[in-house]
C-alpha cells in the first residue's frame, strides 16, 4: 500500500525534507511558546531533545526562557548564525518573516503546518533560501520510521 500523503497544496519529496533536517543544526523558532499545551512547545521540545540548537523567538516581554533556553524578541537579536527559521505564526506574517530570515542570513525558511505564502516563498527562494511550507519538522524528522496504517478499522 503506498504511503498516505498529507493533504497540502505543497509537495516535497521525503528525501528532500530529510536532507534539510540532516543539514541544519541551529533552528530559530518564530512563534515559540512557553505554554506546554501549545503545539509549538512540543515541537521545540522534541527538536531540542533530538539535538538541534533551538532558539525560541517571541516578542512577549514576560517570556525570557523556554525549557531553560533564552528567548529572543526578534531574529535580528540573535547573535549567532541561524541555519533554519521555523515559523509558527499566521500565514499573513510569513512575508515579513521571510525578509527577516534573509536579513540574518538563514539558509532555510520553514512554515509550520498551515503556514504558507507563495510570495514569501518567492522572496526567500530568490534570495537563495530553501523554502518549505505547510509542514512540521517534528513529523518529517520521524517520517522515515513511521508508516501510517490508514487501512485499519477504528
Image: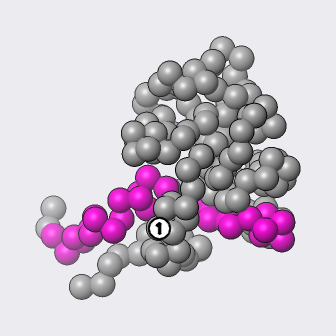
Determine whether, in the image, residue 43 is placed left or right of residue 107: left
Q: Residue at x 45, y 74 (%)?
A: 14
- The residue positioned 41% from the left and 75% from the top of the image is 5
Q: Hey, which quadrant is residue 145 in on the image?
A: bottom left
Label 1: state its secondary structure: helix
In percent of the image, x 55 and y 26: which residue is there?
A: 69
Residue ranking furthest to the bottom? 1
Inspect this view and state whether residue 74 appears.
Answer: no
Image coordinates of residue 28 in percent, x first then y, are 64, 42
Q: Which residues are magenta?
A: 124-152
Foreground residue among 75 and 19: 19
**Number of residues whose C-alpha sits closer than 10 Å to that of mark 1, classed few (under 14), some (14–19) or many (20 or more):** some
> In the rendered image, which quarter is residue 123 located in?
bottom right
For the question of whether residue 10 can be seen, the reply is yes
Q: How is the image coloured?
A: one colour
Between 90 and 18, the one lying in front of the other is 18
In the image, 93: left or right of 108?
A: right
Residue 123 colored in magenta in the image: no
Q: How many numbered discs, if any?
A: 1
Q: Quadrant of the N terminus?
A: bottom left
| Horizontal side, residue 153 vs residue 96: left or right | left
**Residue wearing tag 1:** 18
Amino acid at each position: 500500500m503506498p504511503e498516505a500523503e498529507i493533504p497540502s497544496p505543497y509537495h516535497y519529496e521525503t528525501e528532500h525534507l530529510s536532507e534539510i533536517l540532516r543539514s541544519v543544526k541551529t533552528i530559530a523558532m518564530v512563534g515559540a511558546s512557553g505554554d506546554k499545551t501549545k503545539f509549538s512547545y512540543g515541537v521545540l521540545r522534541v527538536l531540542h531533545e533530538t539535538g538541534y540548537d533551538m532558539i525560541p523567538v517571541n516578542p512577549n516581554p514576560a517570556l525570557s526562557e523556554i525549557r531553560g533556553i533564552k528567548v529572543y524578541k526578534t531574529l535580528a537579536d540573535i547573535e549567532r548564525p541561524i541555519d533554519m527559521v521555523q515559523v509558527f505564526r499566521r500565514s499573513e506574517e510569513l512575508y515579513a518573516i521571510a525578509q527577516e530570515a534573509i536579513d540574518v542570513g538563514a539558509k532555510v525558511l520553514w512554515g509550520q503546518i498551515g503556514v504558507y505564502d507563495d510570495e514569501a516563498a518567492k522572496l526567500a527562494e530568490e534570495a537563495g533560501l530553501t523554502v518549505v511550507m505547510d509542514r512540521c519538522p517534528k513529523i518529517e524528522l520521524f517520517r522515515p520510521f513511521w508508516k501510517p496504517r490508514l487501512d485499519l478499522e477504528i
